[in-house]
Image (cartoon, rainbow, N blue to C red):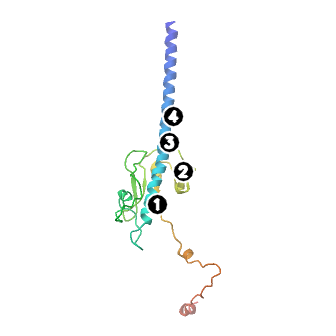
Amino acid sequence: ESGVTLVLVLVLVTILGLSAGIAGSSWSSLTRRAKEADLLWKGGQIRKAIGTYYESSHAQGAAKTYPSKLEYLLKDPRFLEAKRHLRRPYLDPMTGSDWELIKDQGGRIKGVRSTFKEEPFKQGNFSEENKDFEGRGLYAEWEFVYTPKKTNPAAAKKPVEGATQPPEETNPAAEGNK
């Protein structure tokens, strides 16, 4: 009888160990998925803040620039009054440390990315602003970069319907070369 009891105890310990292992891996997956969602949100907030910094200017007609430090998103030094593009600093939720900065040719910050080198759970069905993340194999490949909207000068000069246009000027010298 003592042998049967020992086998029963071993089976119970094995089942308990397997259950704990499954629960642990499920918990790990749940926490990583939550961190992934946090990464998408915080990275998006920093991208938006870089965008508002870039688009705002202290002087009419001043050149648009990216910030040289992430701290400038918390208090823009170009303005005398406090102008905030980001409410508080965010760390990379995947690592708990600073973001890797993505800089332009002039060394100014145009975006951030995580340094976490693991495969993301989310592989598709991203929002429009994150559509470039589809099919990326690592969290470190998710780049939260602000790209200014291209303005089409021809579209800005598009005539109003019904308005008359002055005749196009011709260059007589150019016409002689045709």
* Element type where label 3 sits in the image: helix
Q: Which residue is mark 2?
A: 135
Mark 2 surroundings within 10 Å by alpha-carbon count, few (fewer than 14), some (14 through 19), many (20 or more): few
Q: Nearer the viewer, residue 162 or 153?
A: 162
Is the C-beta separation of discs 2 and 4 under 8 Å? Answer: no
- Is residue 154 shown left or right of residue 39? right
Is the C-beta separation of discs 3 and 1 under 8 Å? Answer: no
Give percent across and percent down for residue 173.
53, 93
Give percent across and percent down for residue 64.
42, 68
Q: Nearer the viewer, residue 35 or 134?
A: 35
Q: Of marks 3 and 1, which one's residue comes earlier in the chain?
A: 3
Which label was assigned to residue 146?
Answer: 1
Of the two numbered discs 1 and 2 in the rendering, the one whose residue sits closer to the viewer: 1
Q: How far apart are labels 4 and 1 at the CA level?
A: 35 Å
Q: Amino acid at mark 4?
A: Ser
Q: Nearer the viewer, residue 119 or 25?
A: 25
Quadrant location of the C terminus in the rendered image: bottom right
Give percent across and percent down for residue 94.
43, 45
Mark 4 surroundings within 10 Å by alpha-carbon count, few (fewer than 14), some (14 through 19), many (20 or more): few
Q: How far apart are labels 2 and 4 at the CA level?
A: 24 Å
Q: Which residue is mark 4?
A: 26
Q: Of marks 2 and 3, which one's residue comes earlier in the chain?
A: 3
Q: Amino acid at mark 2?
A: Gly
Q: Nearer the viewer, residue 98 or 176?
A: 98
55 shown above or below 61: above
Q: Residue at x 55, y 93 (%)?
A: 172
Quarter of the image for residue 85 reads bottom left
Which label was assigned to residue 33?
Answer: 3
Q: How far apart are labels 2 and 3 at the CA level?
A: 17 Å
Q: Amino acid at mark 3?
A: Arg
